[in-house]
Structure formats: C-alpha cells, structure tokens
Image (cartoon, grey):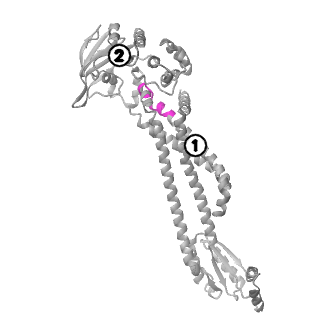
Amino acid sequence: MIYFDNVSKVYSDSSTALSGVTLTIHPKEFVSLVGHSGAGKTTLLKMILAEERPTSGSVLFDATDIHTLRRHKLHQYRRKIGAIFQDFRLLPNKTAFENIAFAMEMVGRSDAEIAVDVPYVLQMVDLGTKMWNFPHELSGGEKQRVAIARAIVNQPDVVIADEPTGSLDPINTYDIVQILKKINDLGTTVILTTHNKGVIDSLGKRVITMEKGKVIRDDPTGKYVL
Amino acid sequence: MLWTSIKRVIKGGVVNFYRNGFVSLASVLIMTVTLFVIGSVLFLSATLTASLDEIKSKVDVNVYFLTSAKEEDILALAEALRTLPEVKDVEYVSREQALTDFKKRHEHDELTLQALEELPDNPLGAVLNVKAKEPSQYEGIAGFLKGDNALGGGTKTLIDEVNYYDNKVAIDKLSRILVSAEKLGFAAALMLVIISISIAFNTIRLAIYISREEIGVMRLVGASNKYIRGPFVVSGILYGITASLLTLALFYPLTYYLGDSLQNFFSGLNLFTYYLVHFGEFFLILVGSGIVLGAVSSFLAVRRYLNV
C-alpha cells in the first residue's frame, strides 16, 4: 500500500538523508524501522506524511503519488494516516477528550458520534478516568496514550509511530507497544521507528534496518541487529 | 455540516480566548490602547473643527455706508450680496441701531455722549456685516463691493468704507493658519493611528507565534487550513470587541472630567455631551475597527505558520 520508488533526499552536498530507497509496505503489516540517529528513519516517515518532498524518486500511497498532491488537498490525504511522535504533540490548551474530539471534528463527525467514540478509544488505551485532564496534568505514558487514541480514532489505514517510546519508562514502553500490536491485530498497518532492542525482539515482526540513508537489511521476522 | 463547522470554529475561538487568559489580556490591553488613540483622534478632530468654526465665525467684513445713503439702496445691496455663492450671511445694522449700539457701548463715557448730543444729526452710517463661508472668500466679496457691478455703478456714492483691506493681513494669516492646523492635525493623527495599529498587529502576531507548534500539529493530524485559522480569527475578533467595549467605557469618565475644563479652554464644545450625542458613531467606529483589526491581524499571522 505504501511504495517507495528509488527515493533520495539531499539537503546539501554534504548532507544526504536518503539515497535510493526502494521498499514496499503491505496492508496490515507491522513494520519496524531501526538504525542509528541520522540514518534516515524520520525522513522516511516525514515523506509518508508529506512533510518532506523527495529530491528524486516518488512515494506512492495506494495509487496516488503523495508529492503531486496539491497543498490544499494535503489535509484530506493526511486523514488516512494516524501519527504518533516521541514528543506527543498534543494540543496543550485542550483536554484529553478535546484533543481526540478535535481529530474527529475535522473530518466532520457529528457531536453524537464524538460523545460515543472518544470515551471508547480512551478506554481502549486504558485512560478512561483522565478524560478531562489537560496534557500538562498527565504523565508521559498517559500523554502518549492520548496521542495514540487521537491517531486511531478516525480508523486510519496506517499508523505511523516515530519513536513513541523514546521518552518513556520500560513499563509504559511495554504498554504502548502492546497497544500498537492490538491496533495492528485489528487490521491497521503500523510503521514504527525505535531504538529499543527489547521492543523489536519481542515483536517478532518485519524489521527494516537503515544506515546512512540506505536500507541495509529487510528481515520479515527480524531481530534488532546493528 | 457547514453549521456544525461554524459552531465548532466559534466555540474553539471562545475557548482559546479564556484558556489563554494572560495572552488574551495582554492583547486586549494593547488593542485598547490602539482604539483609545483612534477614539482620541475623533475627539481631537471634533475639538479642532469646533474651534476652527468658532474662529471662522468671528471673521467678517463690515461695509460702512455714508449717512446720506438711502435705506432701500442699502437693502438692495444686501440682497445682491446674499445672491453671491461665497456669502454665508449678511446682517443689516440701520443708522438708528448703530447709534443705540454706540450709546450702549459708551454708556459710562459721559464726554462722548455729551459730544454726541451736541451734533445736530446722527453721525453714524448704516453697516452691513458680511460673513463668508470660507475666510479665503473675503477677497472676492471685498472686490465685488469695490467694483461697479454691485448696483450698476451706484455703490461708490453709497459706501464710505469697506474694512476688509484693513483686516486683510490678519484674515489672510488666519486662513493660512487654519488650513495648516487642519493638515497638521490630520497628519499627526494618522501617524499615531498607524503606529498604534502596527503595535496591536504585532501583539496579536506574537500571541499566535506562541501557538505555532499547535498549528503544526493541527496540520499534521489532518486539519484543513480553514479549520485551523477559524478559531484564531474568532479569538482576534473577541480581542477587538472586548477592547472596544473597554475603550468606550474608559471614555465615559474621562470626557466627564475633562469636558468642563476643555470647554472653557477651547471652543465651547463639551466633550462629554459630544460623546453622549455621538455615542452611536463612536460605538460603530470603535467596535468596527476593533473587529477588523483583530480579525485581519489573526488571519495574516496564522498564514505564516500554515506552510507545513
């Protein structure tokens, strides 16, 4: 469903983020991206989110070339993707409920649907009791749960998680990975980047290893090897 | 669907307004200053106009007639003057009236009154007080009186003196002062308004700068530009409305206290009564400019951060 065709990203002569990446991500897959900092993992994810344009090559989502989309159409494309980040990126002036409701409002869901679905997803990420708290009143693990709930509430085709456990303790890390697994089991493609060996080894799913902007290993049931 | 979106955008703006309490307060206060400047400019121009009108109304040209001039000729000339487009008003003072006025003016001056008694006849001629619409037009009126066109050559035998030429220098100077005072006042006011608008604009930009990451997040989770921008514009409008109401409230006690002292000092225009009489206009101008300023500043400021 996502296809990178010989994608390169060159910032300047001395700084190449991606060079000649070709890979395919199939529907319902759980893909982990590993590699040192600066290996190009985040750039790859930003390409999928249409935050970055490739210098050469193209990225296809189903049949559409992402980077030929017009700027004012981009937000419709992005609604097919749920994004989770290391720094959570919640809206600070909105409660947990409102953060998730915001994502639903944008796609034009009714107030009645919002009133039913938001508590449901919050329950799913085990945060039913803190619905009315603001992000600054939540712990890191709790914030990440809100972010995950926001990412999945519109039932996207793909969930992208860019080092979601990077600033969490081991127990929260374990919980978050379990939630991602559950999302994948329910039929959503998940793309995960991480530095956590334990996470990768426990998943036993496809692992793509990157180095200096290139894919150096693509293992269907991989381990964390660097 | 559209109604739901509008409702959500408005609600979002209102919620932002009170949750960002301190930022909102700062923006509202700065905008209050701006609107206060705009309001003061309105008061200033009202005072200036009133003072200028007052001064203008004190300028006139007096036509002194010979004592031998017949009353109907004078009235005919007055009629002729009234038909001139430059003339605002012509006041006729008869010989008897002139004498009464003179006596009244000198009622404590026995010597003059006695001298007057000695004369066989009323020595005073009739007078026409001519007022022009603009001070610069006195020249033309005086020229008209000097020339033969007023009564087909008969005026020379009627008119003793036209005092325009005595006052010419003073009148010319006054017209120039009036014109430049108006220009200067307008330029200074415009300057102040521009400066304060740009300060308000920048404050709102800073308020939105604080939210730039939020805007990025909204973009990334798939919000359309309209949906992101809407609440900010609503907040901006709320800043404007709050600030304008605050300004309107501020002017009430201020004009009340200043009204009396300024009335004596300047033109006889009482700012307080002026404010009350023109409250509707003040309301529309201040609330209108508050809303426009808030909405436009927010709209432009958000645009900068939408390019994710």
**Can residue B269 be spotted in the picture?**
no
Callout 2: chain: A
- What quarter of the picture does the N terminus of chain A occupy? top left
Q: Amino acid at mark 1?
A: Ala
Rendered image: mark on residue B89? none
Alpha-carbon distance for marks 1 and 2? 49 Å
B212 in relation to A148, above or below = below
The answer to whether A189 is drawn above or below residue B284 in the figure is: above
Chief SS of the magenta region? helix
Look at the image and say whether residue A155 sits in the magenta stretch: no
The answer to whether dots 1 and 2 both sit on one chain is: no
A103 left or right, relative to B89: left
Residue A13 in the image: state x and y as whole percent.
21, 31
Picture disc at residue A191: 2
Q: Vertically, is B282 above or below A32?
A: below
x, y percent for residue B17: 55, 34
Q: Which mark is residue B243?
A: 1
Q: Residue at x 51, y 62 (%)?
A: B184
Disc 2: CA contacts within 10 A as few (<14), some (14-19) or many (>=20): many
Is B222 contained in the magenta span? Answer: yes
Q: For the C terminus of chain A, which image quadrant? A: top left
Residue drawn at 49 percent across, 59 percent down? B187
Q: Amino acid at mark 2?
A: Ile
Q: Furthest-left residue in view?
A: A13
Q: Which residues are magenta?
A: B218-231
